[in-house]
Amino acid sequence: MSVCDLKADWYRSPTPIIFRPYDGMMTVDPAKLRIEIYPTEILRTKAPEISASDEVRAVAERMVNLMEGAEGIGLAAPQVGLSWRLFVAHVPEHEGDPADSEYPCNTSKPQAFINPVIVESGGGLEPYDEGCLSLPGITGEVRRPSHVTMKALDLEGNEIELKASGLLARCWQHEIDHLDGVLILDKMSQTSRLKNRSRIKAMEKAKKR
């Protein structure tokens, strides 16, 4: 998918996101971005806030392509080696969506958020087996609030406030954790940690070689 193929309805929200060709100088080459694998140091680094720009929009497009290529539903900038407070997400409709949810629990198109912050959460903590594109082969039970309200900037720099429930709310929380250097390894249940212990050690050992 090229930049020119993306139309104004790429993200149906109160403030549409539009990708457009970039003709300026970049300090980051989006084409060179790849998904970083644990225990890469940047995955444990808290990312600083950023401003909307053509460079950020180009990186977000690349992140969407990487996320979709890996069959993921979310990807944060630190996962592609950038210490930026930015993440992309796309949670398609699925069978587990609650039929009577007050808030959206899926998206029709990919989304991108700059400097996201969860400002409200509720509904009680719900367990769910989470995976991570930076932790291939590892899943674990993580308990999170069932619905959240998030404030962020869209790719044009507009302030937005959105609500979500179910898997979409979980995805947003998971990706914001990445922006703070937090992984599912830190939040999964003790049983899940034990289940994944050998795999985690193997990944850490491979990195030292």
Image (cartoon, rainbow, N blue to C red):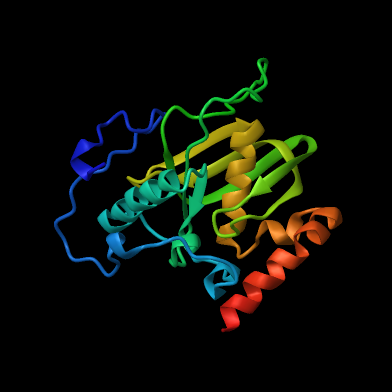
Image position, residue 102 (x, y; %): 65, 21
For the point 73% across and 61% down, the residue is: 186
Which image quadrant: the C terminus? bottom right
Could you tell me if residue 108 is visible in this image?
yes
Image position, residue 49 (x, y; %): 47, 62
Residue 191 sits in quarter: bottom right
Which image quadrant: the N terminus? top left
On screen, residue 10 versus residue 195, left or right, reads: left
Q: Nearer the viewer, residue 203 or 11?
A: 203
Instruction: Note whether 108 is above or below 175 in the view shown.
Output: above
**In this view, which residue lies farthest toward the bottom?**
209
Image position, residue 176 (x, y; %): 58, 53
Residue 207 sits in quarter: bottom right
Could you tell me if residue 49 is visible in this image?
no
For the point 66% across and 25% down, the residue is: 96
Q: How many marks?
A: 0
